[in-house]
Amino acid sequence: MKTFDVKGTVLSLNTPNIVSLLNSIEFYKGKTAQAAKLKKVETLKAIAARSGAVASNAIGNVYIAEERERPLFERTSQPKTLHENMFVGYLNAMDLISEVYKYQTLDRSFVTTLHYYIYKDYNPDFGGKFKDSQNYIQEALPDGTFRTIFVSAPPEEVVPLLDNLIYQFNECAKDEECNKLVLIAAFMLDFMCIHPYNHGNGRVSRLMLHFLMKKFGYDIDDYFAIAYLMKIHLNEYIDAFEASSQGWDGSENNYEEFVTFILKRILEAYRKLDYIIDINALDATAEEKVRRVVDDSATPLSKTMVLRILYPISKATIEKALTKLLRDGRIQLVTKGRYSRYFRI
């Protein structure tokens, strides 16, 4: 059985690369500290919550039709399928976290409650129940087959492993020597390696990331979804987990690659928020801002991406600006149709 040394793990990750990432995160955390006072901030937070929930579920092979995302997110339509029920359950778990994170401690009961919330409206007997058979972490391949990345802890070890992990996490969290972000990232890896439930472990791990970051004062996920970035970097996510999970059951694994991946996504989210704040603060017309966003991007942008950045500006105004910029030859359309992409000249 795996033997945890959570504090030892966290202290061992005090490498130059990780320290540099942590310093950059703290810098951008300070720069974006006034995000709660932004104009139309609730719109920005809704974009983050919706995009994060869609991405986290998609990583877990739970897919929602694009036209169903908004009505389900806004609760103006009832879920009709298993996937839609799990998506709404995930949203309900996020709402629960927002309500209780200030006083809720990390314990097995709360972790199980998050899993229960995902399934409770469709299959309540399944939600919150620990696995009763061996499960595997697998990667779906393009040909429809699966590749086993990791063989998780056996069912009989789930409770003792999870209880010990949570106990050591909470003890380390009290210790000023333990960096909270490193601690959270290492916890995510350990939780995934235990894989306590038959299904939904990845989604619960990302809910835990959301919960623990908010609890320890890092609320970036409220403004720019880390899960959205994890999905964009999905191959890197899988590779980092695979690298850091090797030898886990014998307590010989190296957490650095996975922790580094998580810290990079946190930093990326802070940088994205910093850019959103700066671009919307410009003394410029909507058209000028749209062109600036397209010009600043290293890759082609969809209209949805532009809307997420220039969130205070209406969809109609952005569509009008894109049309005019195209007509005037100041940007180019590189992909046509439903998934149009715009790029700088």
Image (spheres, rainbow, N blue to C red):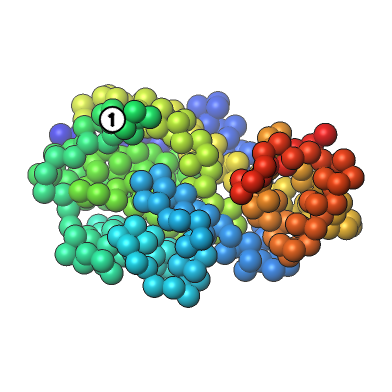
In the rendering, at what x and y percent does residue 334 appear?
Answer: 71, 36
Front-most of residues 271 and 164: 271
Question: Viewed as shown, does residue 263 lie left or right of 131?
Answer: right
In the rendering, at what x and y percent does residue 89 appear?
Answer: 35, 64
Question: Viewed as shown, does residue 131 lie left or right of 253?
Answer: left
- Quick one: quadrant of the C terminus? top right
Residue 287 visible in the picture: yes
In the rendering, at what x and y percent does residue 323 appear?
Answer: 80, 52
Q: Quadrant of residue 134?
A: top left
Front-most of residues 96 and 121: 121
- Quick one: quadrant of the N terminus? top left
In the rendering, at what x and y percent does residue 300 appear?
Answer: 69, 38
- Please name the residue shown 51% across and 35% down the image: 233
- Please name the residue shown 29% across and 48% down the image: 201
Q: Relative to residue 286, is residue 165 depicted above or below?
A: above
Q: Relative to residue 14, is residue 202 depicted above or below?
A: below
Residue placed under numbered mark 1 in the picture: 145
- Please name the residue shown 83% across and 58% down the image: 286
Q: Quadrant of residue 128?
A: bottom left
Task: Find the residue positioned furthest to the bottom.
Answer: 76
Amino acid on which the number 1 mark rests in the picture: Thr
Question: Viewed as shown, does residue 38 lie left or right of 220?
Answer: right
Q: Secondary structure at mark 1?
A: loop
Question: Viewed as shown, does residue 128 lie left or right of 97?
Answer: left
- Number of other residues with Cα within 10 Å of mark 1, as a class: few under 14, some 14 to 19, many 20 or more: few
